[in-house]
Image (tube, rainbow, N blue to C red):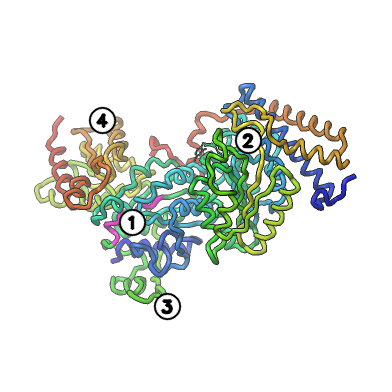
Amino acid sequence: MASKQQFGGLDKKLLIQMYEHMVKSRVLEERLIKIYRAGESYFWIGGPGEEAWGVPLGMLGKKGQGPAYDFYHLHYRCTPTLIAMGLSMLDSVRLMMNRATDPSTGGRNFSNHYVIPKWNIAPVTSPLEVQYPIACGTAHVQKRLGKKSLTVVTGGDAGTAEGDFASSLILASRKGQELPMLITVQNNKWGISTSYEGQHGETTIADRAKAFNIRAQVINGNDPVESYLAIEESMEYIRKTGKPAFIEAHVSRLYGHSSASGANPVQNEVDPVKEFEKKLLKAEIIKPKDVKELWEKFEAEGVKAAEQARSEPVPTADSVWDHTYVGSENADWRNF
Amino acid sequence: MANMAQSIRMALHYAETNYELKDIFGQDVGMPLGGVFTATQGLKTTWNSTLDERGIIGMAMGIAMAGDRCVAEIQFADYIFNTIDLLKIAGNTLWCTNGQYNLPMTVMTPVGAGIRGSVYHSHSFDAWASRLAGWKVVMPSNPLDAYGLLLSCIKDPNPCMFLKPKALMRVRGEELIPGEPQDEKDLKNMIDAPIGDRSKWKAQWPKLEEYLVPFGKAKITRTGEQITVISYGRHLLLCNEVADQLKQEGYSVEVIDLRSIYPYDWQAIKASVEKTGRVLFVNEDTEVTNFAEHLSYRVTTELFYHLMAAPRVLAGKNVPGIGLHPNLEDSSVPQKHEIESLIRQICAEVP
Ligand SMILES: Cc1ncc(C[n+]2csc(CCOP(=O)(O)OP(=O)(O)O)c2C)c(N)n1
């Protein structure tokens, strides 16, 4: 039996909950890849390998709609965060299969490009790094409101070369006008095929935040306990001081960049789900039987979700003008 | 009469007071300067952004996403180009989210030549902006329209682009803004910041009223029977002048101020061209894939059998920049004499 201290003082229930979310997220991503392979979707990109970082991030926010709650400006590897917040497999699969029933985009955008206003999930969009300055805007409104809510922003390591990353560090850290933001980078050491070493001269990305007097740290994002504690502590600091904090989380990329690079499993990176599972088994917090049942349960849920989504309607051709303007006010010049 | 800078200021004040406009920001937008064209002096909610156009547009999108209304300024349209993908995203957010996130934000930016601004203070943006689906794009030619169009932009739940013809910022209108004092000296004393120390100065706002110029509604500024001339912004005034001159010679020129670039008033264009059978489009953005080419294409395809002459587009030359020397600027941006000779030419054409 392991001591409680081994898991940073987190209680057993919480550990099991994190573990379950992590497994669910992994099984879901693998289901999405299978859907892609079966020719039932055009593209996959997602977050297998980022569960130990993403799950605690989703569990710790103040969830709700509007500036009194936390905003999340995520990128395309954030399934774990949303699973932790309560996303159903079915809704993720609907997005993957571009169904009209996809609650994020109605079949208009890629897998894992989530949009969930009821939890302040800002639209995930493909252009890298644009979420960073946009996040400053929601944080600005939260600061004005004064309800101690904060804005989370996430992105990859290679994307930090974009000026938008620097924009957000500057906007978040102006003296007397600091923004309540948790600025994060998920460093998987890759930008598609370009290695970390090929793009960075700084020792850590977190050093860039330090240059703006932003409290910053580098963590092992493959350890959910370390992630949980760092995020929890950073969020408390932000809510208390109204100032930004920065976390660079080192994570894995377990199926390569996307379906464009094959979406095949890689062998030489840490699997955070398996690692955590091993630790929990060793500490007898979970039993081998529970593990088997859990994976099977989510597997069945994934299969069912795909079956269900398959039977659902797709967007109609004449809906293409819908929502160009609010209320679908006419935007087609032919009808002006 | 108010000039355009003052009318913009008054619209912003009206919106701060009545539309819950909470942020007006951009480079040097806050006091003491109140904007490089003074259009944001004396307002309650102005602040200076960082010197970062992408930061400005990104922030505006985030503020709008969180549900607040804002007006963000790009100091000169010449510097808006590095934000073009953010502008695209602002325009497609509602669509990509299947109607779930609308962005009630206004971006305003001074455009065009006419002040000897050389290469990087003379760019136009109307043709570029017309390609930003999901945006509403307007450009006033006089202070009253500036007031009414800006209020429409701020009130609208979609992203709106308010293009300010910079050469008209000091030009006075012919009509009072509702609530504006009769004497322009009174207005100046009330809302123009003094020279020198401004730390204690506060604007005294007149009791303004709501006045909205709807999107997609053009205005006929000269009525005529022989030819339709369609323009907006600074060049609209040149077209009016030419129409008045040619009237002395017996020409009958109809001039339409489009005001709204997207959505645009096709019904006004159609009714006029059906009547005159001749049309000239004038604007100063560069000529290749100019917005007027779309309008001209549409006139040609939909009104072909009403036409007595080929439609023409007079626009900026497709050169890389507007040169500082007047010889350079004047030969790349449409001039009055070119408008005049084209009108004569088109009117002389017979099928
Ligand atoms: C602005 C922009 N440029 C290029 C791309 C194409 N692209 C998609 S992902 C990617 C690599 C991103 O690497 P990183 O930021 O490290 O994130 P990761 O995918 O590794 O999580 C590139 C170049 C893009 N989506 N957006």
- The numbered mark 1 sits on a residue in which chain? B
Q: Residues within 10 Å of mark 4 (few under 14, many from 20)?
A: some
Q: Residue A178: image x %, image y %? A: 56, 62
Question: Of the residues tagged 4 and 1, which is closer to the observer?
Answer: 1
Along the horizontal axis of the image, is A27 left or right of A279?
left
Q: Secondary structure at mark 2?
A: loop
Rounded to the nearest whole Å, what is the CA distance between mark 3 and mark 4?
A: 62 Å
Rounded to the nearest whole Å, what is the CA distance between mark 4 and mark 1?
A: 32 Å
Q: Is mark 2 within 8 Å of ligand 1?
A: no
N-terminal-most mark, 4 or 1:
1
Give yes or no for residue A134 being in the magenta stretch.
Answer: no
Q: Which residue is mark 4?
A: B304
Q: Which residue is mark 3?
A: B200
Between A273 and A36, the one lying in front of the other is A273
Rounded to the nearest whole Å, what is the CA distance between mark 2 and mark 1?
A: 49 Å
Q: Residue B314: image x %, image y %? A: 22, 41
Which amino acid does the dot numbered 4 rest on?
Answer: Phe
Q: Secondary structure at mark 1?
A: helix
